């Protein structure tokens, strides 16, 4: 039947009645293709380990089993890469982008360098993570579950920037009354770990995947002493111990044990708000604006297949930690949670940034 005749029948609603099958939409097939997964950090940090963990699993699950290559675009604490991704539009389904809390925080704080809009992107997978702070052996010997004996020590910390995910540890240490001097400008948390290893820093924190893959070796060698995890959220929204590190106290526990640190009030509310935005909702995989539904659905189905693997929970626990993985609609909800904080928390943090580091985002 000629195309014009088919169109006439379709518009008249007569296709089914005529017993004519509509032409099937072409199935998504990535056979022989290479998908680029861009990470806006260096290759040594937690986001790199996260993407490198998922990339081969995604490759197996996508139709046509394409090669998934992780590429890195560090700069400006991830703002460089995020601004670049904002300019990308759907072409062929072969581009994906991964964000972290360090991408979300400048967005939340209205950083003038931000030229990206999360609402334009298409989330397909998200996962939470945690973080562990650790000390040099000398100060680690003083740690007794509180920071009381650490208040007279001077600490140096390698930081990506006060408006990045490092906001969470910096505010936590400040609430504990510790004297921590950040050295800003590193391109990823892995670079902070290298500073600690070289003795250029004497306090550090890593997200769970990077801690498991890098810092744990320092702990086993006795050159790093774990202090605390940031914790995790229970079903009621309370801070509890991180299930990946159940033997470590949460920041809430250390705060409760430390003189002058309060787990209620403006400082705590602000810290908890940014912790929630930065960790339980931390790492998100996006497709670019304009991605059609069939391509989005192919990625969602692939990530669902990854999550359904019988061995997934075990291999994930070893590589990236014991945290939930969200796909499709769950990833959309996680994106909203990770890019939303209260006006009160935002105002507190903006004032703290200005008073503590002279950072003004106006």
Image (cartoon, helix red, strand yellow):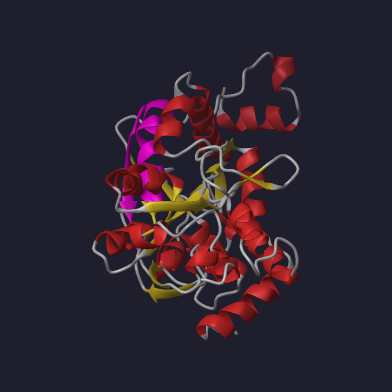
Q: Would residue 37 be seen by someone viewing this image from the given angle?
A: no
At 51% from the left and 45% from the top, the residue drawn is 248
Left or right position of 267 against 212: right
User: Relative to 321, does residue 138 appear above or below in the rendering?
Assistant: below
- For residue 35, which quarter of the picture? top left
Quadrant holding the N terminus? top right
Does the magenta segment cover residue 59?
yes
Left or right position of 333 against 80: right
Query: Of residues 357 and 90, which is closer to you in this image?
Result: 357
At 52% from the left and 86% from the top, the residue drawn is 358
Residue 339: percent from left, percent from top: 63, 59
At 49% from the left and 55% from the top, the residue drawn is 100
- For residue 158, which quarter of the picture? bottom left
Does the magenta segment cover residue 91?
no
- For residue 203, which quarter of the picture? bottom left
At 56% from the left and 42% from the top, the residue drawn is 242
User: Relative to 340, does residue 355 appear above or below in the rendering?
Assistant: below
Please report the bounds of the magenta region as a residue range. Answer: 46-74
């Amino acid at each position: 039947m000629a195309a014009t005749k088919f169109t006439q029948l379709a518009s008249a609603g007569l296709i089914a009645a005529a017993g004519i099958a509509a032409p099937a939409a072409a199935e998504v097939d990535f056979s022989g293709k290479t998908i680029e997964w861009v990470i806006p950090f260096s290759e040594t940090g937690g986001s790199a380990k996260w993407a490198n963990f998922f990339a081969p699993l995604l490759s197996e699950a996508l139709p046509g089993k394409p090669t998934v290559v992780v590429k890195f675009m560090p700069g400006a604490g991830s703002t460089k890469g995020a601004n670049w991704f904002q300019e990308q539009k759907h072409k062929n389904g072969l581009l994906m982008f991964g964000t972290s809390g360090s991408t979300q925080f400048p967005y939340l704080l209205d950083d003038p360098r931000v030229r990206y809009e999360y609402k334009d992107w298409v989330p397909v997978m998200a996962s939470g993570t945690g973080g562990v702070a650790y000390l040099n052996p000398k100060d680690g010997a003083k740690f007794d579950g509180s920071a009381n004996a650490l208040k007279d020590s001077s600490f140096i910390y390698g930081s990506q920037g006060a408006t990045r995910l490092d906001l969470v540890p910096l505010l936590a240490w400040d609430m504990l009354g510790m004297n921590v001097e950040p050295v800003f400008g590193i391109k990823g948390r892995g670079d902070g770990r290298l500073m600690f290893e070289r003795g250029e820093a004497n306090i550090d924190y890593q997200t769970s995947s990077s801690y498991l893959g890098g810092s744990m070796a320092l702990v086993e060698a006795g050159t790093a002493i774990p202090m605390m995890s940031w914790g995790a959220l229970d079903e009621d929204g309370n801070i509890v111990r991180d299930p990946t590190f159940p033997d470590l106290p949460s920041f809430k526990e250390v705060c409760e044990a430390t003189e002058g640190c309060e787990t209620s009030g403006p400082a705590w509310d602000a810290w908890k708000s940014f912790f929630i935005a930065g960790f339980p909702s931390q790492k998100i995989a996006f497709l670019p604006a304009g991605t059609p539904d069939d391509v989005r659905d192919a990625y969602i189905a692939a990530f669902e297949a990854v999550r359904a693997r019988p061995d997934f929970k075990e291999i994930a626990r070893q590589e990236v930690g014991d945290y939930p993985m969200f796909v499709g609609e769950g990833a959309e909800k996680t994106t909203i949670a990770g890019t939303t904080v209260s006006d009160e928390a935002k105002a507190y943090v903006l004032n703290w940034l200005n008073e503590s580091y002279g950072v003004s985002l106006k």
